């Protein structure tokens, strides 16, 4: 018999949000025609505190997965994409190095 704990902890929720952020950035990279080896700068704006905390907690993971040299708050302008992560809005912008 196997016991499986199906409770979602705050840590697991933040990890899930971070993985969703990675997925969105990877899609932006693909849509922009970037190569896998291309380094990028990523800017973001998030309206929800839990999403901001997830990005900060998982910063190294996110940057490593998407080949980012920079991951900072401040996405704005027409190039920034409005996305949905979890129950919140996220604005993302990437720029090739």
Image: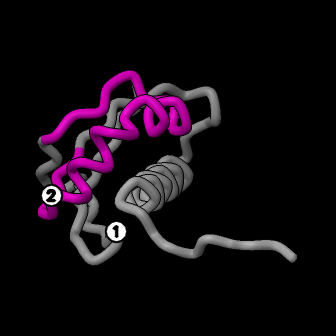
Of the numbered discs in the image, which one, if any, rests on residue 85? 1
- SS at badge 2: helix
Please state which of residues 39 and 73 is positioned toward the viewer in this rendering.
73
Depicted 7 relative to depicted 67: above or below = below
Q: Is residue 7 left or right of residue 88?
A: right
Residue 77 location, x and y as percent?
Answer: 12, 52
Q: Quadrant of the C terminus?
A: top left
- Occupied quadrant, residue 43: top left
Alpha carbon of mark 2 to alpha carbon of mark 1: how far?
Answer: 12 Å
Visible residue check, residue 24: no
Circle 2 or circle 1, nearest the eye: 2
Residue sitting at x 32%, y 26%: 70
Depicted 73 relative to depicted 77: above or below = above
Residue 38 location, x and y as percent?
Answer: 55, 28
Provide the residue designation for mark 2: 49
Depicted 9 relative to depicted 30: above or below = below
Residue sitting at x 56%, y 52%: 30
Of the numbered discs in the image, which one, if any, rests on residue 47? none
Residue 81 location, x and y as percent?
Answer: 28, 61
- Occupied quadrant, residue 21: bottom left
Residue 33 location, x and y as percent?
Answer: 55, 47
Please state which of residues 58 and 63 is positioned toward the viewer in this rendering.
58
Visible residue check, residue 75: yes
Please state which of residues 87 and 80 is positioned toward the viewer in this rendering.
87
Q: Is residue 84 left or right of residue 33?
A: left
Depicted 10 relative to depicted 61: above or below = below
Disc on the earlier residue, 2 or 1 = 2
Residue sitting at x 45%, y 39%: 62
Check if residue 65 falls in the magenta segment.
yes
Report how many numbered discs are placed on residues in the image.
Answer: 2
- SS at badge 1: strand
Magenta part of the protein: which range?
Answer: 44-73
């Amino acid at each position: 018999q196997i016991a499986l704990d199906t409770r979602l902890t705050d840590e697991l929720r933040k990890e899930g949000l971070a993985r969703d952020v990675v997925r969105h950035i990877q899609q932006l990279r693909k849509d922009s025609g970037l190569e896998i080896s291309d380094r990028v700068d990523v800017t973001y704006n998030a309206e929800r505190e839990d999403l901001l905390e997830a990005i900060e907690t998982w910063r190294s993971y996110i940057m490593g997965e998407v080949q980012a040299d920079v991951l900072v708050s401040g996405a704005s302008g027409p190039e920034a994409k409005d996305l949905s992560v979890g129950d919140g809005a996220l604005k993302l912008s990437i720029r090739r190095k």
